[in-house]
Amino acid sequence: MTHPTTPRICPNCDGHASAAITLGGRDASGHLRTITAYCPACHGTGTRPIRTREGARA
């Protein structure tokens, strides 16, 4: 059985690993103030590592 070599999409964020959240209001030059929040499960990558299964050892 072959395993895929590409990492799979993070199930917690569905690949959308970061989001811009408005803080409300604007700064002195009129720009909207935002912060970036990252997915805590994948740390902002959008992918999860492939799990390797260990076989039974005799």
Image (cartoon, helix red, strand yellow):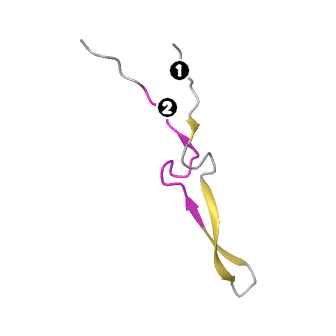
Instruction: Report the number of discs.
Output: 2
Q: State the residue at coordinates (55%, 43%).
A: 11
Q: Are marks 2 and 1 in contact (CB under 8 Å)?
A: yes
Identify residue for label 2.
50
Circle 1 sits in a helix, a strand or a loop, which is it? loop
Foreground of the two, 51 or 27: 51
Instruction: State the extent of the magenta-drawn residues as a range.
Output: 36-52
Q: Compared with residue 33, is residue 42 higher up or lower down, i.e. above or below? A: above
Question: Any mark on residue 40, and which?
Answer: none
Residue drawn at point x = 53 percent, y = 54 percent: 39
- Place of residue 43 in the rendered image (x, y in percent of width and height, measured from the top left): 50, 51
Q: Is residue 30 above or below residue 4?
A: below
Q: Classify 10 Å Cα crowding around label 1: few (below 14), some (14-19), many (20 and above).
A: few
Q: Is residue 21 magenta?
A: no
User: x, y percentage for residue 44?
Assistant: 55, 52
Residue 22 is situated, as x and y percent measured from the top left of the image, at: 65, 73
State the residue position of label 1: 3
Q: On screen, 8 above or below 31?
A: above
Q: Residues within 10 Å of mark 2 (few under 14, many from 20)?
A: few
